Amino acid sequence: MMMAKKKIGDMAIYEYGFILGNSKVHIKCDKKDAILASAEEMKRHIKDLSDYIKKNPQILYALEPLEVEPEAPQIIRKMAYASKMANVGPMASVAGAIADFGLEALLRMGSNIAIVEDGGEISASTTEDIPISIITSERKLSGKIGLLITNDDSPIGIATSTGKTDRVVSFGEADSVTVVAENAATADAAATSICNAIVGLNAARSILKGLERAKNIRGVRGAIIIRNGQVGLVGKLPKIIRIRD
């Protein structure tokens, strides 16, 4: 198991990246042994998801929330709850949900700095300030601004959705919708829901509509919407910072 190592403040931070299903996963943590436990935890939940889909393939294509049985695997129940809060299909929250389970494993092992990124969706908890950059289809801003995550923000989920890619199902037209929430599953589902609301020729009006939707999704702390060079903010966000080139 090869890991990179660097420092945040006085803490040694270990980094590990791997492919999980169709996603690239990246873990950063101050406890080396916790990383393996986190990876195994995420793999277990992915297997549970895969087994469930074989028996219930409709979950793959649903664009609205689905009711699931109480005995469904934990990953399914977490996805179903997040999607219900955001009024989207369960698969809209899958990457964030997996990241959340990875984070829980890191924290159980006593990690002080713990970050799990699954396909761009982030679940994190930290005692030291950590910057996280925002990637958007708006080239002038992509990778240039970010959020400074602190102990007061933790734990936190961060997810970004865009209407400018064919890789995911989106009905919106935003360059990006970045959501900060109580966990990554909620952030993931909410980002999809809010992005779907960003439609129409009037960019400013569509952004306002998206911000209004963000305010009405339980568990969402705040959102940043970018469309056609215009930016809208709502809620209680971590400090917005400039990312150095």
Image (tube, rainbow, N blue to C red):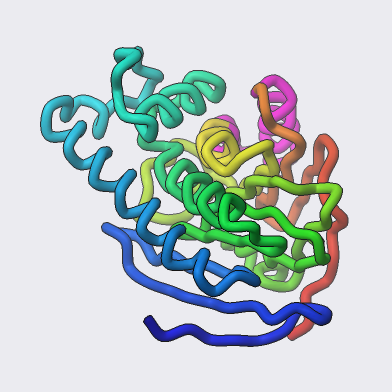
For residue 220, what is the image quadrant? top right
The quarter in which the C terminus is drawn is bottom right
174 or 130: nearer the viewer: 130
Residue at the (57%, 57%) spot, across then down: 109
Residue at the (75%, 78%) spot, across then down: 11
Residue 16: % across, % down = 47, 75
Q: Is residue 110 visible?
A: yes
Residue at the (69%, 64%) spot, across then down: 113
164 or 82: nearer the viewer: 82
Residue at the (61%, 52%) spot, across then down: 107
Residue 146: % across, % down = 75, 64
28 or 159: nearer the viewer: 28
Is residue 76 found left or right of 120 in the rendered image? left
Please check the rendered image and state whether residue 84 is part of the magenta-colored stretch, yes or no: no
Q: Is residue 196 visible?
A: no
For residue 23, what is the image quadrant? bottom left
Instruction: From this view, report whether residue 57 is shown above or below residue 116.
Output: above
Residue 194: % across, % down = 59, 33
Is residue 97 found left or right of 23 in the rendered image? right
Please check the rendered image and state whether residue 210 is part of the magenta-colored stretch, yes or no: yes
199 or 102: nearer the viewer: 102
Instruction: From this view, report whether residue 12 is shown above or below residue 123.
Output: below
State whether the magenta stretch is mostly helix, strand or loop. helix
Instruction: From this view, report whether residue 47 is shown above or below residue 73.
Output: below
Instruction: Look at the image and give the residue range highlighted in magenta.
Output: 194-217
For residue 63, what is the image quadrant? top left
